[in-house]
Amino acid sequence: MRVQVKLEHVVWILLILTVASSTAQEGADQPRNVELTNAAWTPYRNGDFAAAMTAADRCVRRFKDEADKAQEELHKKHAPNPPTGKVTAEQKKAIFDQGVLNDVATCYWIKGSSAQKLHRDAEAKDAYTAATKYTYARAWDPKGWFWSPADDATDRLQDLK
């Protein structure tokens, strides 16, 4: 008995296997700062804001000094702020190269937003204020663009006044 397999089905199977393999590899090879940031985003997206704050604090405690150093170095060089929105492949790589800086700023933002949702305004203000200091940081939106935790935190601080 001869089995006929359509080329279209083979392509779909290979695509599924490739995506599954790369996804498994990404999870295994992620730097610790990425793991910790993802650990903060997950409860945040699920509405568990207290857990999100706790997870965000873990990232901040572990990587704050490194992020501060990266921010200071970029400031001393008078580097231009990275763009927000959709960017070129080259710009995307340059932004992702600042992973620790991005993740610490994002975790401060997650903590601030979570605290705000829990009506813990003093904690929200502290976290947002900390996020505003990381002007070179960018956060990736899965929809395909970057945003600035510092800029958004500045706006949210105005809302808390």
Image (cartoon, grey):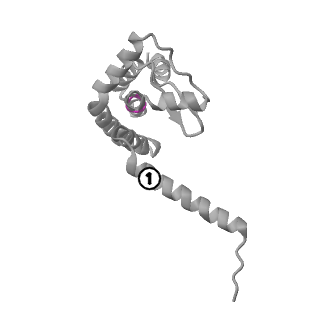
Mark 1: which secondary structure?
A: helix
Query: In the rendered image, which residue does mark 1 sit on?
Result: 25
Q: Quadrant of residue 103?
A: top left
Residue located farthest toward the front when viewing the structure as drawn: 2
In the image, what residue occupies the spot 27% across and 33% down? 62
In which quarter of the view is residue 49 placed?
Answer: top left
Q: Amino acid at mark 1?
A: Gln
Task: Please tell me which residue is depicted at 41% across the width and 12% down the height of the picture.
Answer: 75
Q: How many marks?
A: 1
Q: Position of residue 158 (x, y in %)?
A: 47, 16
Identify the residue shown where x is 37% and y is 16%.
Answer: 73
In the depicted structure, whether residue 52 falls above or below residue 29: above
The answer to whether residue 154 is left or right of residue 3 is left
- Tell me: 151 left or right of 144: left
Magenta-highlighted stretch: main secondary structure?
helix
Image side of residue 123 versus residue 19, left or right: left
Q: Residue at x 41, y 20 (%)?
A: 134
Does the stretch in magenta take in 154?
Answer: no
Work out whether residue 108 or residue 6 is closer to the camera in this orientation and state it: 6
Residue numbers of the magenta segment: 109-113
Q: Is residue 126 visible?
A: no
Can residue 74 be seen here?
Answer: yes
Instruction: Name above or below for residue 15 compared with residue 110.
Output: below
- Measuring from the top left, give residue 80's x and y in whole percent: 51, 14
Image quadrant assignment for residue 30: top left
Viewer-side residue, 78 vs 151: 78
Picture coordinates of residue 81 (x, y %)? 50, 17
